[in-house]
């Protein structure tokens, strides 16, 4: 087990290193100067001073080594746009709303999805099953920004049930959370339905029935646990959807989070922030995948054995 | 022995010859794999509905732009923000009128402010309605809704813009179908590229196995650790945003899933007896690949490709939405939705039409792909 | 002796997209206390469905018992509600499944799975149930049962798992044990062990066993009586000697003829041509007629009733009708019959 985790962490570091390297060199190839958007014309001399200050005159190799070394210390450089603020600070500053939004969407979405998927499997081939399937296919198909736009227009603008944008209290989180959670909800529902159907058709459920176990007890004591374990594996795709989701949803609802910052940075060529956020997203994603794998082997007794006997 | 059986005529007990094949004939007719799959797909109401919607959208994306004489990139600022108008469908609300909500200290004041703000002459106001008196409204003002015949007000009585016009007076109908064309083009092209790379990579990795396989798998392991989003955004930033950049960026990340599935399937098939049998009969690598492996892997390739198309369409619209997609005057469904966000609160039709079409497109592809999977998946075959 | 279980005219149907499948079509049999009844037949003959019907486990809503009675202990199981059935399942009638690799819950400790049935049906404390479970595991020959209680199924070998499944089935001293091909998925040596174990336990607990199999070797080993099923019907029924040494139905001939034995190794095995009929549209006459070398005109027109061969032996074939021509069974079968009349060794 320990060996397995160690191996995974080594892979994780290699992946991160590749991402950091690729990000760095790609950013170097970007057109446009980072200082174009600062407003006002800059003289050549001024630009030269800034280049010197940010180390942009050093050979690329030196810049690269500096970047990697600083990165390992948690220093992701200094933003070109925000009065020399450290990228790490900017990210930490903005992580709150994004984390809250992501957590709300993930938890509520997953729970609702699991319930929906279960209900759909138990009521297999009934009108409930079809309805749940339609909800799931809509949730998977409709892009989050389209859904967000329709929510914002109908629930916000037209009927005035919820605030349309900004981030000033719990009520403000309602619309963005709904918009963000629809995808996790849909994939959880579909996955749970398939798993549950498979488990309910399995021999050990039949044996439990043959023992005289009652319907509800079969569901909760035998089926649920076995069906829930594999659902952990959708956490990976769900994280990705939350990341893409935060970019557009935060933009639409003017949430001061990392995603909104990232989109702004793209338009202003703020390289250090783009690189920093990219790395941040990568760490998040790789971390979640690692946690999923470890969690899976801890929860499922079958895998616990193959991971190493002790 | 009961009595009834005594009354059976003797000749009934003559021996008859059973034909050899009769036992076989009684079983159900055998269907070829693809025929069987097709039958099953055609019984899937959802998948057929999805297919019909898709065919309709594809036809419209080709025919739509030439159904009227308006160009997608021909701005006419005088015709900006004309609401949808279709002759014959006025009863659906597609009558070229638009409702504006205005506020003022009195009813007249509100109307006056509205006319000034939106620059309309009073004669074109068809109807006014008080939505809220000061007592009812939150801020103590009159809230009035004006219904204006915008076409008449802007001097375009004889024109019909079926989906209305955008902020630059371009025909939304033409732009939407052009945008649909581009979304479809990117989706299908990216899916094909994904398929080619993925099948090749997965096929080689699975077929040759051994060291080749383990090296190729380590590479995939590292690559799959990188979130797609990050690669796509970086690629687009480096290349000039545009059709090619988007397609390449999406294709570069999408093949991994296909490669994994194909490798798994090839590995599984490779160990099976019929491949072994064919090898002992002296079949060459090429023959085994072409005659045995590919046909057996084909169904999962088809299924996976069908799922790639909607995800590529989504990625394109997502990139356009965050400003990394097609550059104006070109439009895709994503960029149309993005620009609609600027003023859809007053002109909701800007958002609604492209939103509905992209949703139908995505749902259509996803349902059809689901149906195909159910129809083609050998595990489901009985 | 009195019958403990009596199945009368049992009919089970399934609604499918293609139409109604008649999986079981008028099955009659009974079983006495302490007796072992083997139900033999090829896959799809309705033997598993019959036992599922007895357990009340026919998959709803598509499947249902459309006609017939299952009399047990003075009650008709076919008419009991789900709730009433739950009190009988696992307590009076229990079941062993075919594949021990999949019939245990992978995420529940083995001990808990054995205890579950005990706690459900008997008013005992957890501690007592645990002791009983250890006792049971010991009874089915699992070494070191206390420690094994806390392990998960994947830590057991196939044979050991089947022993656990048997322990679960025995938990409440059932009167009838249904074993649905309990040895098919096991290695030959393990098969023999499990069969021995079942016989031993049957004697100890004096229960009746319904043994489903397509392996005639196993039948000869365990059964007192045999029912041969074909296309949802019992076509021949009798004591094990009747079936093995005086078979009357051409289908039974086919089954026996296709089984290799030490004696007939010089003979050519007889294969039954063709495939079983589609039960979506069962044929009008004898379902076996189309594959029957001895078929007569009547076989295609009317279903044969059960003709009596002896007090213990019945067969549903028109060949037993008094007007039917005398036919010669295949050589392999004739040899068996001769041996029987001479009182030779079994099988």
Image (cartoon, rainbow, N blue to C red):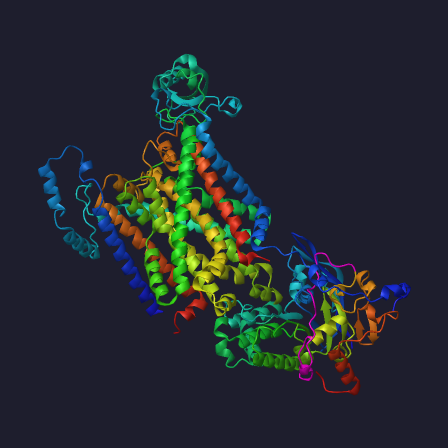
Q: Which residues lie in the magenta part?
A: C258-284
> Predominant secondary structure in magenta?
loop
The answer to whether residue A148 shows anywhere in this view is: no
Residue at x 40%, y 35% (from the top left corner): B179
- Of all residues shown, which one is farthest toward the top? B123
The image quarter containing residue C220 is bottom right
Q: Position of residue A224 (x, y in %)?
A: 51, 59
Q: Position of residue A202 (x, y in %)?
A: 56, 63
- In the image: residue B85, left or right of residue C28: left
> In the rendered view, would you say C40 is above or below A179?
below
The total number of labels drawn is 0
Q: Is C278 included in the stretch rendered in magenta?
A: yes
Q: Position of residue B138 (x, y in %)?
A: 39, 27
The answer to whether residue C287 shows anywhere in this view is: yes
Image quadrant for the N terminus of chain A? bottom left
Which residue occupies the foreground of this view, C116 or A126? A126
Q: Position of residue A270 (x, y in %)?
A: 22, 43
Which residue occupies the foreground of this view, A208 or B107? A208
> In the rendered view, would you say C330 is above or below A184?
below
- In the image: residue C152, left or right of residue A286: right
- In the image: residue A244, left or right of residue B284: left
- Of all residues shown, which one is farthest toward the left? A45
> In the rendered view, would you say A84 is above or below C100?
above
> In the rendered view, would you say B124 is above or below C73?
above
Which residue occupies the foreground of this view, B173 or A282? B173
Q: Is B191 included in the stretch rendered in magenta?
A: no
Image quadrant for the C terminus of chain A? bottom left
């Amino acid at each position: 087990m320990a060996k397995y985790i160690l191996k995974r962490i080594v892979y994780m570091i290699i992946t991160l290193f590749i991402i950091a390297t690729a990000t760095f060199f790609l950013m170097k190839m970007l057109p446009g100067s980072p200082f174009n958007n600062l407003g006002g014309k800059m003289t050549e001399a001024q630009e030269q001073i800034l280049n010197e200050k940010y180390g942009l005159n050093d050979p690329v190799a030196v810049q690269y080594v500096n970047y990697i070394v600083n990165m390992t210390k948690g220093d992701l450089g200094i933003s070109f746009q925000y009065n020399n603020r450290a990228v790490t600070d900017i990210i930490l500053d903005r992580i709150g709303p994004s984390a809250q939004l992501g957590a709300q969407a993930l938890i509520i979405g997953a729970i609702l999805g699991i319930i929906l998927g279960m209900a759909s499997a138990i009521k297999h081939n009934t009108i409930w099953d079809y309805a749940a399937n339609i909800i799931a296919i809509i949730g998977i198909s409709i892009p989050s920004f389209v859904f967000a736009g329709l929510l914002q227009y109908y629930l916000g603008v037209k009927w005035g049930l919820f605030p349309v944008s900004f981030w000033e209290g719990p009520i403000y989180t309602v619309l963005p959370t709904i918009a963000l959670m629809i995808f996790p909800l849909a994939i959880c529902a579909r996955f749970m339905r398939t798993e549950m159907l498979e488990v309910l058709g399995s021999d050990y459920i039949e044996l439990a029935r043959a023992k005289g176990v009652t319907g509800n007890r079969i569901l909760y004591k035998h089926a649920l646990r076995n069906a829930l374990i594999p659902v952990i594996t959708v956490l990976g795709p769900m994280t990705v959807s939350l990341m893409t989701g935060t970019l557009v949803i935060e933009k639409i609802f003017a949430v001061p989070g990392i995603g909104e910052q990232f989109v702004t940075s793209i338009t202003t060529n703020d390289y250090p922030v783009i690189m920093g956020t990219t790395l941040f997203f990568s760490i998040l994603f790789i971390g979640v995948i690692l946690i999923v794998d470890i969690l899976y082997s801890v929860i499922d007794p079958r895998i616990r054995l193959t991971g190493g006997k002790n | 022995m009961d009595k009834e059986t005594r009354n059976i005529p003797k000749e009934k007990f003559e021996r008859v010859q059973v034909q050899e094949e009769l036992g076989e004939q009684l079983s159900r007719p055998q269907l070829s794999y693809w025929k069987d799959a097709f039958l099953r797909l055609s019984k899937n109401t959802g998948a057929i509905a999805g297919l019909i919607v898709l065919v309709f959208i594809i036809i419209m994306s080709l025919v739509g732009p030439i159904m009227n004489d308006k160009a997608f990139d021909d701005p006419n600022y005088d015709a900006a923000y004309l609401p949808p108008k279709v002759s014959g469908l006025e009863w659906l609300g597609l009558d070229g009128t638009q409702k504006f909500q205005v506020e003022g200290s009195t009813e007249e004041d509100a109307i006056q402010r509205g006319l000034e703000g939106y620059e309309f002459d009073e004669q074109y106001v068809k109807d006014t309605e008080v939505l809220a008196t000061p007592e009812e409204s939150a801020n103590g003002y009159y809230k009035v809704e004006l219904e204006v015949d915008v076409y008449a007000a802007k001097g375009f009585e004889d024109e019909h813009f079926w989906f209305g016009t955008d902020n630059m007076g371009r025909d939304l109908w033409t732009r939407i179908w052009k945008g649909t064309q581009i979304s479809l083009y990117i989706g299908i092209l990216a899916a094909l590229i994904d398929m080619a790379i993925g099948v090749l990579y997965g096929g080689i990795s699975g077929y040759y196995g051994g060291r080749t396989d383990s090296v190729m798998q380590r590479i995939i392991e590292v690559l799959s650790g990188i979130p797609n989003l990050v690669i796509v955004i970086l690629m687009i930033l480096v290349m000039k945003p545009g059709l090619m950049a988007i397609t390449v960026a999406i294709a570069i990340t999408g093949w991994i899933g296909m490669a994994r599935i194909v490798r798994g399937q090839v590995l599984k098939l490779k160990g099976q007896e019929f491949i072994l049998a064919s090898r002992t009969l002296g079949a060459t690598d090429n023959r085994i690949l072409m005659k045995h492996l590919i046909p057996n892997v084909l169904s999962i390739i088809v299924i996976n490709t069908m799922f790639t198309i909607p995800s590529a369409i989504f990625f394109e619209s997502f990139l356009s939405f965050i400003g990394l997609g097609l550059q104006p005057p070109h439009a895709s469904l994503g960029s149309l939705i993005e620009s609609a966000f600027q003023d859809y609160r007053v002109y909701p039709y800007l958002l609604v039409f492209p939103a509905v079409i992209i949703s139908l497109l995505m749902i259509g592809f996803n349902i059809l792909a689901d149906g195909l999977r159910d129809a083609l998946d050998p595990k489901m075959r009985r | 002796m009195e019958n403990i279980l009596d199945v009368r005219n049992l009919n089970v149907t399934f609604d499918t997209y293609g139409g109604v499948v008649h999986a079981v079509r008028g099955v009659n049999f009974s079983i006495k206390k302490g007796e072992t009844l083997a139900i033999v037949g090829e896959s799809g003959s309705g033997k598993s469905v019959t036992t599922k019907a007895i357990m009340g486990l026919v998959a709803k809503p598509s499947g249902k018992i459309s006609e017939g009675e299952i009399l047990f202990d003075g009650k008709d199981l076919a008419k009991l509600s789900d709730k009433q059935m739950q009190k009988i399942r696992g307590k009076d009638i229990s079941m062993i499944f075919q594949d021990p690799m999949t019939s245990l819950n992978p995420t529940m400790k083995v001990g808990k799975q054995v205890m579950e049935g005990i706690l459900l049906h008997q008013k005992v404390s957890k501690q007592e149930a645990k002791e009983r479970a250890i006792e049971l595991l010991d009874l089915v020959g699992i070494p070191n049962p206390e420690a094994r209680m806390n392990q998960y199924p994947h830590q057991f070998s196939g044979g050991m798992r089947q022993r656990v499944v048997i322990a679960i089935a025995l938990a409440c001293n059932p009167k009838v044990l249904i074993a649905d091909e309990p040895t098919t998925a096991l290695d030959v040596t393990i098969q023999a062990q499990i069969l021995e174990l079942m016989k031993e336990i049957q004697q100890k607990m004096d229960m009746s066993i319904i043994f489903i199999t397509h392996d005639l070797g196993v039948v000869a080993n365990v059964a007192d009586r045999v029912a041969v099923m074909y296309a949802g019907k019992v076509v021949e029924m009798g004591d094990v000697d009747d079936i093995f040494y005086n078979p009357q139905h051409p289908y039974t001939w086919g089954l026996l003829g296709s089984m290799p034995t030490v004696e007939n190794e010089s003979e050519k095995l007889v294969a039954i041509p063709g495939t079983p009929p589609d039960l979506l549209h069962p044929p009008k006459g004898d379902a076996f007629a189309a594959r029957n070398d001895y078929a007569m005109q009547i076989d295609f027109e009317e279903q044969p009733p059960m003709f009596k061969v002896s007090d213990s032996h019945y067969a549903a074939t028109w060949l037993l009708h008094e007007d039917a021509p005398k036919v010669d069974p295949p050589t392999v079968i004739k040899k068996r019959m001769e041996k029987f009349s001479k009182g030779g060794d079994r099988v």
